[in-house]
Image (cartoon, rainbow, N blue to C red):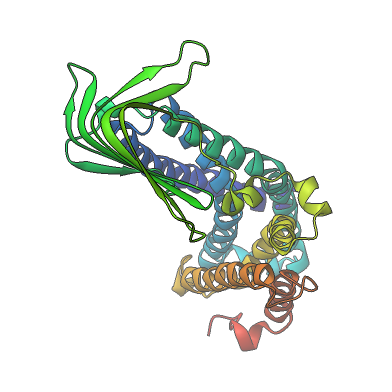
Amino acid sequence: MIIDRYIMREIIKPTIAVCSILVFIFGCYMATHFLVDALSGQLPGTTVIILILLRIAIALEVLLPTTLYLCVVVALGRLYKDSEMTALFACGVSMGRIIRPVLYTAVATAVVVASLSLFIRPWAYHQYYRIKANAEANFDITRMNDGTFYETKNGMRVIYAEEVDRQQDEVERVFIRTERDDDLQVIFAKQANQIVDPASGKQIMVFSDGHLYEFSRTGDDGRVIQFEQSAMPLEPEAYLNQKYRVKAEPTGALARSEKRKDIAEFQWRLSTPLAAILLALIGVPLSRSSPRHGKYAKITTAVVIFAVYYNLSALTKKWVERGILDATPGIWWIQMLLAGLLLVLLWQPSKILRWRGK
């Protein structure tokens, strides 16, 4: 038990530290991203922190197993560097005894990753897109910059104003393009202002002295309407369109679905915790090195293996979605490939990794 606790401590402490640093860096990156939207009027400042936390919850599904995998390689690599592994093996400690605490840590991490992948991540995606849609519906035109185009994240609406008068809370020579299903609507107006409907509380843009153009993608004739005044509610867009619906869909609904996109997403969510265990175990034989090589000797190899795994997983998911690859084995052949690599590294170390560090 002493050996178990010692090895687990050597792995868990850097995992928590490195994961915290990565979360902080990711949070700062997202803060910069959302700050641009907040300053441009697309996002109220009060929603920025919530959106950052939601994006962190989504990213943890990948950050946590990746950090554990790399920290296993580095932590055990340090034991090899300081000849502690040599001492353990000399005392009769087997490789299986070294793997056991790593497996305990990996299983505990996999439980957390499973919770993230199956429940927290889809919930976070749902909340994220709902908040973004409502925030964009409450777009503040008076915070726009003169002569700048503003486009919503899914490209369904584009707004432009040649001049913004913040004292009068109105814009001059405004253009707005809105896409809805098969229809395209374009409005040119000399002036526009923004009001709140007292009954519904929704934001409404009121246009003065302009033209409304409506076009159909089906080939039907469009129409042009000249108006002295026209109002358009800034309703939340269909934030759960096909592209994002799958990510935000509850796992139970995906399990019952027969759509290829749903099947691929369901397999991805189930495979993530399994991959966390396999990657951590691969880190054990991968960490073997000679004391003169240092604890970071195999970190480059570890990064390459993870990059190949992650990109193959993403590519296989696309293949399943498009019908190029059958749902069986689907994404699971990537996990079988990881398991095969683990067996090769464990049972043929002298040929693959030079266990003796020669």
At x 70%, y 64%, the residue is: 278
The answer to which of 294 and 45 lies nearer the viewer is 45
At x 56%, y 57%, the residue is: 66
Q: Position of residue 316 (x, y in %)?
A: 64, 72
Q: Position of residue 221 (x, y in %)?
A: 44, 55
The answer to which of 39 and 329 lies nearer the viewer is 39
At x 73%, y 75%, the residue is: 333
Q: Is residue 92 visible?
A: no
Q: Is residue 243 visible?
A: yes
The answer to which of 32 and 63 lies nearer the viewer is 32
Relative placement, left or right, of 299 versus 352 is left
Q: Residue furthest bottom?
A: 351
Q: Residue furthest top?
A: 198
Residue 52 higher or lower than 62, as above or below: above
Q: How many marks?
A: 0
Q: Position of residue 139 (x, y in %)?
A: 37, 30
Quarter where residue 281 is shown: bottom right
Q: Position of residue 344 (x, y in %)?
A: 71, 81
Residue 207 higher or lower than 62, as above or below: above
Relative placement, left or right, of 105 versus 53 is right
Relative placement, left or right, of 100 versus 10 is right
The answer to which of 155 and 269 lies nearer the viewer is 155
